[in-house]
Image (cartoon, rainbow, N blue to C red):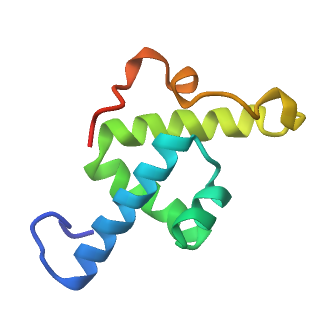
Amino acid sequence: MYDIFYDESAKSIKIRTECNMICHCMLNTGCTIRECEQATGIPKSTVHALIHSYIERYYSSEYTAIVKILEYNKTYRSKPKSAWLYVDVKSILGEDYNEEKD
């Protein structure tokens, strides 16, 4: 894996843009991988790959928050929709994450 922040090739710019889109979508809505796929237009397998490679490496605080959201989704989204429909992202992440990080 090469360093996407020091390489200005079209591929690096595309990866950075997709990572930013995924972080924005996941952290602002607390959505699932499939909902992120629909919102961003990035295939589900690519969303997984970017989260667990580039976002993990270059966006460590965002990665930690996204993992919490994914764990929450895995645990609670299998329950009836009324149990999780109106849950706020801040309640999932707790006090650990500052929303203003970009």
- What residue do we see at 20% from left, 67% from top? 4
**Dividing the picture into quarters, in which one does residue 98 lie?**
top left
Residue nearest the observer in this picture, 19 or 81: 81
Q: Is residue 81 left or right of residue 68?
A: right
Q: Is residue 63 left or right of residue 8?
A: right
Picture layout, residue 57 above or below residue 16: above
Percent position of residue 17, x then y:
32, 67
Residue nearest the observer in this picture, 102 or 78: 102
- What residue do we see at 39% from left, 19% from top? 96
Q: Is residue 82 left or right of residue 84?
A: right
**Dividing the picture into quarters, in which one does residue 19 lie?**
bottom left
Q: Can you name the residue that lies furthest to the left here?
A: 6
Percent position of residue 13, x then y:
24, 74
Picture layout, residue 68 above or below residue 66: above
Percent position of residue 39, x then y:
57, 63
Percent position of residue 47, x then y:
52, 63
- What residue do we see at 29% from left, 33% from top? 100
